[in-house]
Amino acid sequence: MDNSPTDASTLDGFDEIFTETVALVDSLELGLISLNPTLDETFAEADTLDPGPLADDITGFTASLAVPGTNVDNLGTLLGSLAPPTPAAGSCGAGSAGSGPPCGTHGESSISLDDHTDPCEAATTLPKASIKDGKCVWIFKCDGSQFPGKCNVSDAQFYQGDSRLFAISHDTAPGSTAGSCISRVIFTVSPYKRGHFLARFKVSTNRKSTPEIWCIIIDVIA
């Protein structure tokens, strides 16, 4: 069939199709013109890339890194040069100081029939305390030479009694043998009223898994 632009082509639709095709091409040209600034910006970013091969960049970066084995060897040398710490002299602590006179110069406290020492695993009396003398500190070494016997103390807490009058703490101090340490329990008495008093304390030691109950009895005079 002859589709050349003749008068007869108007009868087979050729002119109509050709006209639509030209119009479509014209519209594509307008679309490309409108996109042109955007395309320029896009390819401008690409133009800034290093034209050199990417492999060259990776090779150069790898060469700038230190050899891992060298770093490991250096770390091993550093660790090998470290010596274990030397224990400081006097690591047992200096120990707290007890009270001097006039504490302990008024005679020994007495035990009363009303003192309930049944739950106490250790009980003792302190010298009488005088209100006018003020605070007194009594220290018991746990090396077997004093109450309550040989032990290592890890904790000491007030349990029952007059917490205004009694306080408890513990520390360590050098023992009689060079380099040895001993545990000590410190009772602080702050007399503020006359009377006969008993206090209980919970003391954690290496002798049992639960705290021991220690009892202290004291007479306070004017």
Image: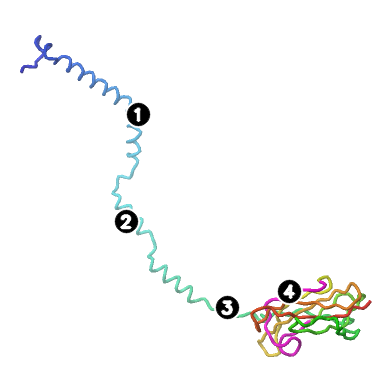
Which sits earlier in the primary sequence, circle 2 or circle 4?
A: 2
Disc 2/disc 4 C-alpha distance (Å): 69 Å
| Picture layout, residue 11 above or below residue 102 | above
Please tell me the numbered disc located at residue 157.
Answer: 4
Q: Element at badge 2?
A: helix
Q: Is residue 189 toward the left or the right of residue 29 in the image?
A: right
Which residue is depicted at the point 75% across and 82% down? 120
Residue stretch rendered in magenta on the structure: 139-162
Please tell me the numbered disc located at residue 103.
Answer: none
- Mark 4 packing: few (<14 Cα in 10 Å), some, or many (20+)? some
Which sits earlier in the primary sequence, circle 3 or circle 4?
A: 3
Which sits earlier in the primary sequence, circle 1 or circle 2?
A: 1
Which sits earlier in the primary sequence, circle 3 or circle 2?
A: 2
Q: Are marks 1 and 4 in contact (CB under 8 Å)?
A: no
Residue that carries the numbered disc 1 in the rendered image: 37
Picture quadrant of residue 172: bottom right
Residue that carries the numbered disc 2 in the rendered image: 59
Residue that carries the numbered disc 3 in the rendered image: 85
Q: Is residue 25 toward the left or the right of residue 172 in the image?
A: left
Q: Element at badge 4?
A: strand
